[in-house]
Image (cartoon, rainbow, N blue to C red):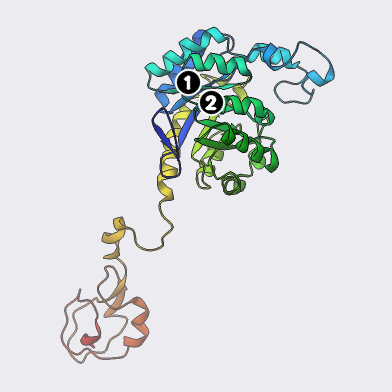
Amino acid sequence: MISIAGRAIGPGHPPFVVAELSGNHNGSLDRALAIVDAVARTGAHAVKLQTYRPDTLTVDAGGPAFRIGDGHALWGGESLYQLFQRAHTPWEWHEPIFERAREHGLIAFSSPFDPTAVELLEKLGVPAYKIASSEIVDLPLIRLAAATGKPLIISTGMASAGEIHAAVAAARQAGCTQLAVLACTASYPASPSESNLRALPLLAALTGEVVGVSDHTPGIGVPLAALALGACVIEKHVTVSRAEGGVDAAFSLEPGELAALVMESERAWESLGAAVIGPRASEREGLRFRRSLYVVRDVRAGETVTGENVRSIRPAGGLPPDAAGDVMGRRFARDAPMGTPLTWDLI
C-alpha cells in the first residue's frame, strides 16, 4: 500500500482514479480550469498535469527523426516541437490549476520531464510525481524525483522487463519508499487488443509494487477489466468535450464517462471480495426457498406416494428433489395435510 496526500492506495482500498489534463486545455487557462471543475464533479480523486516546455523535451528541428510518422492517427507529420508547443501547459498556469483542484478537494500533481520541472513542482508543493512512459529510461530524472521523498508513479509503456527493473531500482536507491507502477500501451489512441491486462499480475510480481493502468483506449471497459487483475490506480485523459477537439481529445473521457468510471470502478473493486465459495450472508434468506419435496394435497395413512401428491416445490424443508425416485411407490405412515414437508418419518 502507498499513500498520496493522505489517500491510501492499494489492494485493500477502492481504486485511485486520476484524471490527466494533458494538452486538452487547447491553449486556454479558462478551459483548463473548466476541466478541473468538471473532474471535481465526477468524484475522481486526482487531477494530473504534465510539466515541460518544448525546449526541455526537444529542439526545433524538422528532420525525419524529429517528426511524427505520417501514418499516426492523431499527429501524423507534425514535428515534435510543434506538438509540444501546442500541448504543453504553461508553467505560470500550474499554480492556479493546482489551487483550483485543491479548492475542490482534488489531489493535484504532475509529470516532470526535466530537473527544472521538478524544481517548479517542489515549489508548488505537489504531493507526488508521475514518470511518463517515455521517461522510464531517464534514470537521472527518476532518481531526482525519488530523492524528494514524495510517492512516485511510473508508467511502463514500451518498456522491457529489464527497463522496468532498472527504473524501480533507481527509484528505490534514491530513497523512494512509496511506489506504484502502471501498465500502459503508449500509443494514442491505444487498441484494447494491445492492452495485455493479463500481464498485470506479472508486473506486480516483477516489481513487488502497487500496480495500475495508464489507459489510452476509448471508453472505460479496459480499466474496469484491469481492476479484476489487481489494478489499484486508474489514469485516464479527460476533456470537457471530444467534439471540441484537442491534442488528446480523441482518447479522452468526457465528464459523464469519467463519472461512470469512478462509480463502476468502485463497484468492480467491491465485487472482488474474497476467494471463497459458498453461500453469502445475504443469501441466507434465499436458502429457505430452495426446492424440496412437499405433500401437495391432503393424504391419509396408507396412501401411496405418487407424483400427484408429492412434488418438488419451493420452499426448502423437505427431502431433496433427488430423493423423489426413492419415495415414489411407498406409503404414507400417517395423515398429512397439503403443505407438509416430506420427511423420511412420514413414509
Q: State the quadrant of the N terminus.
A: top left
- The residue depicted at 19 percent of the width and 90 percent of the height is 333
Quickly name the residue at label 2: 129
Q: Quadrant of residue 8?
A: top left
Give the residue type that dot 2 points to. Answer: Tyr
Where does residue 224 sit, x and y in percent of width and height?
51, 41
Does the image show residue 188? no
How many numbered tags mark residues here? 2
Is the Cβ of the residue at disc 2 closer than 8 Å to that at disc 1? yes
Q: Quadrant of the C terminus?
A: bottom left
Q: Considering only vertical position in the picture, is 130 above or below 335?
A: above
At x 31%, y 67%, the residue is: 290
Q: Quadrant of residue 300?
A: bottom left
Determine the secondary structure under disc 1.
loop
Which residue is the site of mark 1? 126
- Residue 274 sits above or below residue 329 on the image: above
Q: Position of residue 331 (x, y in %)?
A: 25, 91
305 relative position to 263: left or right? left
Q: What's under tag 1, amino acid-wise?
A: Val
Q: Camera-side residue: 122 or 67?
A: 122
